[in-house]
Amino acid sequence: MTVDQMVEETRSLPQSTVLELVDRILVAMHGEQEPAHKKAWSKTIHRRIADIRSGKVEGIPGEVTSAKVRRIVGR
């Protein structure tokens, strides 16, 4: 199966399943996060979500970010 085929397969899956898959791949490649780092990131993520929900900051759509990354890496 090609990478493109795998990505296409994920389009039909629930978001929670895709997120779990990504998490498992990252853990398989890099190992588990240190508990202190995990706690710090969790606090940061919750704060950022609260900032977006309150209107304090505006998020950038994923498509815009992905396009910018592709331009930077030349894809």
Image (cartoon, helix red, strand yellow):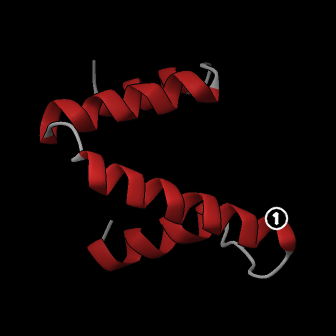
Q: Quadrant of the N terminus?
A: top left
Q: Residue at x 39, y 76 (%)?
A: 71
| Image location of residue 35, percent across then percent down | 27, 45
CA neighbours of label 1 inside 10 A, class few (<14), some (14 to 19), many (20+)? few
| Image location of residue 73, percent across then percent down | 28, 72
- The amino acid on which the numbered mark 1 sits, given as a three-letter code, is Arg
Q: Residue at x 38, y 34 (%)?
A: 22
Instruction: Tell me: 56 left or right of 44.
Output: right
- The vertical placement of 70 against 38, above or below, is below
Between 3 and 53, the one lying in front of the other is 53
Question: Under tag 1, what secondary structure?
Answer: helix
Between 23 and 71, the one lying in front of the other is 23
Q: Quadrant of the C terminus?
A: bottom left
Instruction: Tell me: 63 left or right of 68.
Output: right
Residue 29 placement: quadrant: top left
Between 48 and 65, the one lying in front of the other is 48
| Image location of residue 17, percent across then percent down | 53, 21
Q: Residue furthest right?
A: 54
Instruction: Tell me: 67 left or right of 27.
Output: right
Q: Which residue is mark 1?
A: 53
- The vertical placement of 58 against 2, above or below, is below
